[in-house]
């Protein structure tokens, strides 16, 4: 009898089945556009030239997968949420784009052959796997499907993201949420009580993310903080709509992206490594 495939966390699936992930990176609340553009900026400076093969694991509704397809990359999308896969396929058809494949799948058991990818994106799975053993399995799966010399780009949520983000939207004024945030800062595990705006997760310290990826057999090339503190401005939408102010937000994030003392201020960390 074969090994039973890993089962996604039901609470996390229910959170994403609400359908809000499709447009999250377009919404000014929480700095979504800043996260999107900074992620693409870091990807662009490392990706091989198209038509390299990219596997977007935990790729949601295909925000980055479809962008990469539009640039000429051969893209496979895997996500544990059926709705996300359906949305990615529908958006691809509407925009006249093509994904090599899009299917429901889990980062801990990727249904692709060994050494079949030039790049693997893990832009979501590591912060929805609370157990280190599960995160290690996901990293080893990414390594398995990468060709020698291939690139891993892995995102994590900063250990202090719920403090800074919660402060920006007023959640820290709720004593019960504050206790959850304090526990997350201590242990990395985030087990929120509604209404938190997010679901069960794991939040990394920068050096912890680097160690986990290194221990899975990768050579770390770069670790950056994506957004800096620009996401937290109350008038973020106004700033983002103004081209000069938007570029200032981007440049501020660039200037501090590798400062060790400031990495954790960004809601998201992005690590680039090589097999």
Image (cartoon, grey):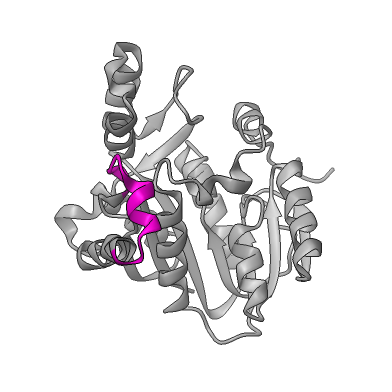
Of 158 and 21, nearer the camera is: 21
Magenta stretch secondary structure, dominant? helix
Of 83 and 123, nearer the camera is: 83
Residue at 69% x, 44% y: name it: 80
Left or right, 136 with reference to 3: left
Q: Is residue 232 magenta?
A: yes
Q: Is residue 242 magenta?
A: yes
Of 197 and 261, nearer the camera is: 197
Left or right, 85 with reference to 108: right
On screen, residue 103 above or below 4? below
On screen, residue 197 above or below 153? above
Left or right, 106 with reference to 149: right
Residue at 42% x, 79% y: name it: 45
Q: How far from the left and from the top, in percent, is residue 101? A: 78, 65
On screen, residue 230 above or below 11? below
On screen, residue 273 above or below 187? below
Q: Is residue 35 visible?
A: yes
Magenta region, residue range: 231-244
Residue at 27% x, 54% y: name it: 228
* The furthest residue to the top: 175
Q: How far from the left and from the top, in percent, is residue 156? A: 41, 50
Q: How far from the left and from the top, in percent, is residue 109? A: 68, 52
Q: Is residue 115 visible?
A: no
């Amino acid at each position: 009898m074969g090994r039973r495939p890993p089962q996604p966390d039901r609470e996390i699936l229910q959170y994403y089945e609400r359908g809000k992930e499709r447009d999250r990176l377009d919404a000014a609340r929480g700095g979504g556009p800043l996260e999107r553009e900074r992620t693409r900026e870091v990807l662009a400076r490392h990706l091989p030239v198209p038509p390299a093969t990219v596997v977007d694991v935990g790729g949601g509704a295909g925000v980055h997968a479809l962008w990469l397809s539009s640039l000429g990359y051969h893209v496979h999308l895997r996500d544990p949420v059926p709705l996300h896969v359906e949305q990615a396929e529908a958006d691809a058809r509407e925009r006249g784009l093509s994904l090599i494949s899009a299917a429901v799948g889990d980062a801990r058991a990727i249904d692709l052959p060994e050494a079949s990818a030039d790049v693997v994106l893990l832009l979501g799975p590591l912060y929805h796997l609370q157990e280190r053993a599960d995160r290690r399995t996901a990293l080893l799966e990414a390594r398995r499907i990468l060709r020698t010399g291939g690139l891993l780009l892995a995102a994590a949520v900063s250990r202090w993201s719920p403090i800074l983000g919660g402060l920006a939207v007023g959640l820290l004024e709720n004593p019960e949420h504050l206790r959850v945030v304090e526990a997350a800062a201590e242990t990395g595990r985030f087990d929120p009580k509604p209404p938190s705006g997010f679901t069960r997760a794991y939040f990394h310290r920068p050096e912890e993310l680097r160690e986990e990826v290194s221990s899975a057999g990768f050579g770390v090339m770069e670790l950056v903080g994506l957004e800096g503190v620009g996401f937290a401005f109350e008038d973020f939408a106004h700033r983002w709509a103004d081209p000069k102010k938007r570029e200032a937000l981007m440049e501020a994030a660039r200037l501090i992206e590798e400062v060790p003392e400031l990495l954790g201020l960004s809601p998201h960390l992005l690590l680039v490594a090589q097999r």
